[in-house]
Image (cartoon, rainbow, N blue to C red):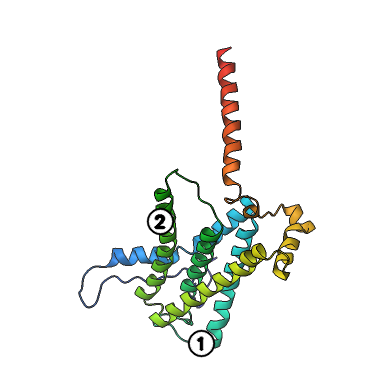
Amino acid sequence: MMLEGPRASLDLTHVVLKLTAPETDDDTSLFSLALALITLSPILLMASYAALAVQTREFLVITMWVGQIACELLNWVIKRIIKEERPIGNGYGFPSSHSQYMAYFATFLICHLYLRHRFSSTGYTLLDGLWRVVVYAGVLAWAGLVAYSRYYLGYHNARQIIWGLSIGAFLGVVLYSVSELVPRCWPSSYLGRTKIWLLSNPVSTWLQIRDGWAVWPDAGREGEWVRWRRRWEEERRGRETKRTQ
């Protein structure tokens, strides 16, 4: 049965497009549509966090996911303290939650990729360096496009977006330092001991939570691939031997 009564838009997913540019009367609907899709893209991150957490059981992924949720909760609290309206639409706009969300994600990820993760090598130093630059630029470009989309579509002014980016980047640096950098550099510190307990307690052991980067510079991805490739080739040769008999 269809519900009756007043209705409201879910702010997280409802996006109003610009169909024309008033100053030029040029059709900008395709550009607006592209930015509308980009502005919705952060929703995909939560599903990605969940999938990676279940699949890898990596402490870093779970920590980053928890921090992302905490970042959103903090944004919700700040908005209801400041109570600054959006340029258009309903609800509060300071700081921009999309900008804060993506700045946290990009900052935490780049800190990890730069300080801890080892990419697979092509055998050429220049290509390896270029690949790192491409990855960093791609992450930053995604965050920047999401932030710009909020400005272009009129949901936030520049100040709201800049503050959102600043808060998100700050939180990303702080959480990475607290959860990864300090425990690794000073394992006997309070944060170091806390991380050891989080990884070694019975619940984490039962859930098989691990810190792959504490053992392997790529979290063991290359070793897992080598084991898979060796087993795959053995089984393939076995099937071929059976067919020839």
140 on left or right of 196: left
Quarter holding the C terminus is top right
Residue 181 visible in rendering: yes
Q: Position of residue 178 (x, y in %)?
A: 63, 69
Rendered view: 102 above or below 127: below
In front of the other: 46 or 237: 237
Q: Residue furthest right?
A: 202
Of the two numbered discs 2 and 1 in the rendering, the one whose residue sits closer to the viewer: 2
As drawn, the label of residue 83 is: 1
Q: Secondary structure at mark 1?
A: loop
Q: Are marks 2 and 1 in contact (CB under 8 Å)?
A: no
In front of the other: 45 or 28: 45
Q: Earlier in the sequence, mark 2 or mark 1?
A: 1
In the image, what residue type sits under mark 1?
A: Lys
In front of the other: 181 or 37: 181
Q: Secondary structure at mark 2?
A: helix
Which residue matches tag 2? 134
Q: Position of residue 173 (x, y in %)?
A: 55, 70
Q: Position of residue 45 (x, y in %)?
A: 52, 61
As drawn, the label of residue 228 is: none
